[in-house]
Image (tube, grey):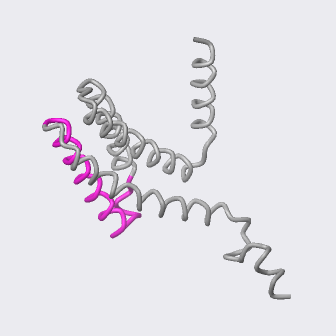
Amino acid sequence: MVPSRYHNQYRKNEISTSSQGRLILMMYEGAIKFSTMAIQSIESGDIAGQGKYINKTHDIINELSLALDLKKGGEVALRLESLYQYMLSQLTLANIKSDRKSLEDVVKILSPLAEAWEQLYHASTNTGQGNQQPPKNIASKC
């Protein structure tokens, strides 16, 4: 399939040229996506799909855990590590017992983390002018 090949190449290029912050965001987005797909697989009785998507989520969260720098990250890194380990155990439980609730718990943890990383990413890619308001707010003050 030709379009699939081009799509895969585009994704590889996107990943290889992304900043570290963007890569973290992509990992969170992928983990949420695959967790949701695992939930759908459980609902439809697709055991192979369930295992596939839980394993993909597991791999992503494991990578996020391995990427933590516990020395430089201090308390935040320790808390993230604790959350990642909890999510990994929930994924194992979800896979063994086809437990939808465990997957929903993982999504409930991942979603606010992804939102926080997105805010950090956008703040770090700001033009360096600080936390200024959008132009329409500045104009309305004049």
The quarter of the picture where the C terminus appears is: bottom right
Farthest residue to the top: give it: 1
Q: Which residues are magenta?
A: 68-96
Q: Is residue 141 magenta?
A: no
Side of 75 relative to 28 (left or right): left
Query: Quadrant of residue 11 in the image?
Result: top right
Farthest residue to the front: give it: 44
Farthest residue to the right: give it: 142
Question: Where 102 falls versus 6 (above or below)?
Answer: below
Farthest residue to the bottom: give it: 142
Q: Nearer the viewer, residue 135 or 25?
A: 135
Question: Where 65 falls versus 12 (above or below)?
Answer: below
Q: Position of residue 52 (x, y in %)?
A: 31, 28
Query: Quadrant of residue 54 in the image?
Result: top left
Numbered label tally: 0
Q: Residue at x 55, y 64 (%)?
A: 119
Side of 18 relative to 30 (left or right): right
Q: Nearer the viewer, residue 86 or 39?
A: 39
Instruction: Give the overall secondary structure of the magenta segment.
Output: helix
Query: Quadrant of residue 5 in the image?
Result: top right
Q: Position of residue 103 (x, y in %)?
A: 27, 46
Side of 133 relative to 36 (left or right): right
Question: Where 117 falls versus 88 (above or below)?
Answer: below
Q: Residue at x 35, y 34 (%)?
A: 56
Q: Residue at x 62, y 18 (%)?
A: 3
The quarter of the picture where the N terminus appears is: top right
Q: Residue at x 30, y 63 (%)?
A: 78
